[in-house]
Amino acid sequence: MTSVTPTITERWRSWRGVLGALGLIVIVAALVVLGSGARNGGPLDIEATSPQGARALAELLRGQGVEVNQVTTFDDAVEQAPGSLLVVARPEFLADDAALAELAGRAGARLLIGPTEPVLTALAPGVTIRTASPETVREPGCALKAAVLAGDAFLGGPSFADATCYGAKVAVAGDVTLVGSGTFMTNGKLAENGNAALAMNLAGTHQRVTWFAPRFPLGVPEGGQKSIDELMPANVGWFVWALIVAVLLTALWRGRRLGPVVEERLPVVVRAAETVEGRGRLYRARAARDRAALALREAALARLTPRLGLTATAGTDEIVTAVAARTGQDGGQVRQVLFGDTPAGDAALVALARDLDMIERQVRES
Amino acid sequence: MALTGRAALLAVAGALIVLAAPAPAVAFWLVVSVIAAAIVIDLVLAGSVRALRFERSDDLRVRLGETAEVTLLVANPGGRRVHGLLRDAWPPSTRPGPREHDVDIPAGERRRVTTTLRPLRRGDFTAAGVTVRALGPLGVAARQGSHQVDGRIRVLPPFLSRRHLPAKLARLRAIDGLNPVQIRGQGTEFDSLREYVVGDDVRSIDWRATARRADVVVRTWRPERDRRVLIVLDTGRTSAGRVGVDPSSGDPSGWPRLDWGMDAALLLAALCARAGDRVDFLAYDRTVRAQVTGGGRGDLLPGLVTAMAPLEPELVEADAHGMVAAVLARVRRRSLVVVLTDLNATALDEGLLPLLPQLASRHLVLLAAVADPRVAALAAGRDGADEVFDAAAAERQRVERRQVTARLRRHGAEVVDALPEDLASALADAYLNLKAAGRL
């Protein structure tokens, strides 16, 4: 009689190897991810090395001696904007009209990429946008120096009123530059056509660039649409956490067995008749009516001959005559049943089995 | 450790408090710390499971179909009361009940826990372990631990055919000398001389002995005694096939041929012992699985059931050469060799049949086999082509069986082929017939 539950020391001893291996895997994975230098980020994020990122452009600008700073909040943008080119890379995240107005007050030169209505109203008043069209490679088609030097570029998005370059996708009004879409600045597209040149010409006009690319929506639009989080009382969140604790405890309560599962060597379970059934299925599968009929006839004869007072060596004629005499049936018919042809179909086989039964019964009862 | 339903209930109640509380964050952390504190208090204050001491009653023997009670003595030498659940685990085939016991053992005391086993199968079973869950004073958490406590139960063959024994013994007595008429005949041997009493058969008067003495003396006869019977049980692959309906549990998947064979062997052995013959037993497939030699009359049956209990069908082809060699090595005098096997044409053709003359020349061989009622049922099927094909297959098998029986008889062996419920009785009758005919 011994306790078989391990002590805490024994548990630690048996698990420390596994835990150590897991820790090692986590550390190695973290080192690999950090060391590879790959950065994920949203589109036009200058940290991002993905095809949608804009790291390549930022590196090119830095190579030309331009200082590029990425900001993700209004506060940082307002602080950094004066004296630099403000690039608004993710206008869809800027919906706070008050903050936009403050930014407009502080910013000097600005480059708006695919601007939305609120951004346009705040940062480029007076410019109106027309219908949007798909992105494609477009020719400059205007006298703008930046465009002429760059040549063809991949552009699309909304068109601007009173603009001529690239099918009205690029507009310059004073120190405000508007671009219909930003795809030509991404890592994936920068090397094609004149994309890189156009991007450099548009973004490299100042010694300092403030790249405003928020990673999530900033502020809420006027009109006070609150998110579901803000509408719920704080109790609900904590209630959910308390329920999670309750579910966890219930799982631990129900999941704990009173002792380990008992295992046992069980005997084989095989019906002795399985070989017979298997042979029956084989007959069926091959439609072996000849063998089936032979087996049925042999068995019937083996039972009939002793009843008829005949020996096992009795000939065909002898048996047929004896059966016909005992049952009063026609001899030809008896011969057909006992020694006849192979049944032509399944129905004939069933009929043969019934006929054999009938002859046996008549012989038995006569 | 283990938690109880109270811990979960506490957490649910706490969740409702958090929902209603004015400061939910504070309430949440308060609830969590109360539950954690309760769990820690319970774990610290629960009685020690590791310190418990167990004692078990001796190994048990029980016939299949009966129930056994195993008692476990639990001593608590620790300083705190152990209150909670105890599970005495046994293999599922023994159907232990109840699954868990409520135990309450004050410090320094002992308690007896009884578990009832209702085994489903024959064989040896060992206890799987004892697990105790000791609740803390708050009933929120418990300490849990397992102990290995050795224990064994041997489930013996049920010997259901013993109900035939009185009838067979009556027949034996009819053959035996206990019968008032003592006539010399086949299967009898000279017993003794005694004085003539009125009613004795005058033909049994021994005139020579009468001449030597003043009285008329008759010779008395008795059936042959002290013959040897060797029962050989085939435990090879053919013995695994299930036939009929399991009589101990009513399981329609049937009982292995081996178990039917054991039942028949036990009745035969009981009968032989009463008839004054010596019984040896041998279980063989490729090696000797069990043997009982020359048991005295009193302890023959207990020895047999004990030897049979752990036998299982081995999924190997039986080695007939080895079996015949084992038989010849064990019995030198002419004996009745009863082989309990299957009349499987291919197995016998390649196995026992070629060796039968060798065995039959030295001994009287009796083969006993279980017929499958399912084959008879299949052979009677006439509804549709599928059933007729099955019927043809069944007839084919019965023809093969008849042919192999005929070949065995030609080689000088006796054959008993009976349905599972009738095998024991038929085998006993065959033995009595041989005895009456003086062929032993």
Image (tube, helix red, strand yellow):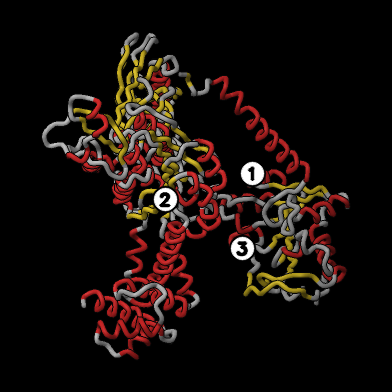
Q: Which residue is disc 3 drawn over?
A: A116
- As helix, strand or loop, the secondary structure at mark 1 comes to helix
* Residue A351 appears left or right of A97: left
Give the residue displayed 83% in from the left and 51% down from the top.
Answer: A59
Disc 1 residue type? Asp
* Quadrant position of residue A349: bottom left
Q: Which chain carries label 3?
A: A
Q: Quadrant of the N terminus of chain A?
A: top left
Q: In the image as oriented, which residue stretches furthest toward the front? A: B211
Q: Distance between the residues labelled 3 and 2?
A: 99 Å
Image mark for residue B367: 2
Q: Can residue A231 be seen in this view?
A: no
- Front of the two marks 3 and 2: 2
Q: Can residue B135 be seen in this view?
A: yes
Q: Where is residue B199 in the image (x, y as percent from the top left)?
A: 12, 37
Q: How far apart are marks 3 and 1 (CA)?
A: 20 Å
* Quadrant position of residue B142: top left
Give the residue displayed 38% in from the left and 36% down from the top.
Answer: B227
Instruction: Please tell me if label 2 and label 1 are on a single chain.
Output: no
Badge 1 crowding class, 10 Å Cα cut-off, few under 14, some 14 to 19, many 20 or more, is few
Q: Mark 1 lies on which chain?
A: A
Disc 3 residue type? Thr
Q: Where is residue A347 in the image (x, y as percent from the top left)?
A: 37, 84
* Residue B418 appears left or right of A108: left
Instruction: Please tell me if label 3 and label 1 are on a single chain.
Output: yes
